[in-house]
Amino acid sequence: MLIEDYEIELSTPACDLESPVYMAKVSLASDIGEVLPYVNATVEKGEFVPGIPVLVWKDGGRKYALRPGEMAISSITDKEEAGALVATLVDRINAIWENRSSLEPSYASWEKPKVLDLLKLLPGTNCRECGVPTCMAYAAKLAAGKMRLEDCPRLGDEDCAEQLSCLQDMGL
């Protein structure tokens, strides 16, 4: 077993000390650096930087970060939820470590699309049907993961099929 002992510390985001959500910082008794490429192989859109090493990804509205001696999980409502989420992540990492011989490690990193690259593929009508005032604002929210392709009704039009396909190929 790779992770046997850890401590959880909850904190509010530094930018909003009155936030109703917390971040769990988990200090590990063991170094998990070797498992990061294997975990990266199992997550979607993982941002992996082997030289540091750090692995970051989003899942279910939460952001996860792994480093050799620590883990972090965002958007947690209370201590009980933190404990459950951390236990699930520890179990997942331990299972990946135990089965690493059957996994191909991945050193690839998903690169977030740039706002201007997204903007070039949008209809450019500034129709506001997505709920934001401009296609540029929509592109920025899309790049940040705060909006989805489905939020732009115009991308569903037949004349936007090629642009939609390109956006989907970017992993959006």
Image: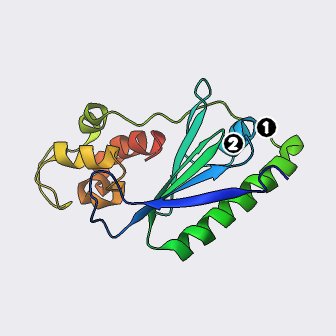
Of 83 and 116, nearer the camera is: 83
For label 2, the crowd category at 10 Å Cα-Cα, with few meaning under 14, some 14 to 19 and many 20 or more, is: some
The quadrant holding residue 23 is bottom left
Position above or below: 167 against 21: above
- Residue 78: percent from left, percent from top: 47, 74
- Residue 103: percent from left, percent from top: 81, 42
| 146 relative to 110 in the view: left or right | left
Amino acid under label 1?
Glu
**Residue 46 in view, yes or no:** no
Of 112 and 14, nearer the camera is: 14
Q: Residue lying farthest bottom?
A: 80
- Residue 119: percent from left, percent from top: 24, 38
Q: Residue at x 87, y 44 (%)?
A: 102
- Residue 17: percent from left, percent from top: 28, 60
Q: Residue at x 72, y 48 (%)?
A: 29
Q: Residue at x 66, y 30 (%)?
A: 107
Secondary structure of the residue carrying tag 1 is loop
Mark 2–mark 1 distance (CA, rounded to whole Å) = 7 Å
| Dot 2 or dot 1, earlier in sequence | 2
Of 139 and 39, nearer the camera is: 39
Residue under label 2, please give it: 41
Residue under label 1, please give it: 104
Secondary structure of the residue carrying tag 2 is loop
Q: Residue at x 18, y 47 (%)?
A: 137
Q: Are marks 2 and 1 in contact (CB under 8 Å)?
A: yes
The quadrant holding residue 149 is bottom left
| 99 relative to 25 in the view: left or right | right
**Residue 15 in view, yes or no:** yes
Position above or below: 167 against 109: below
Amino acid under label 2?
Ala
Position above or below: 163 against 82: above
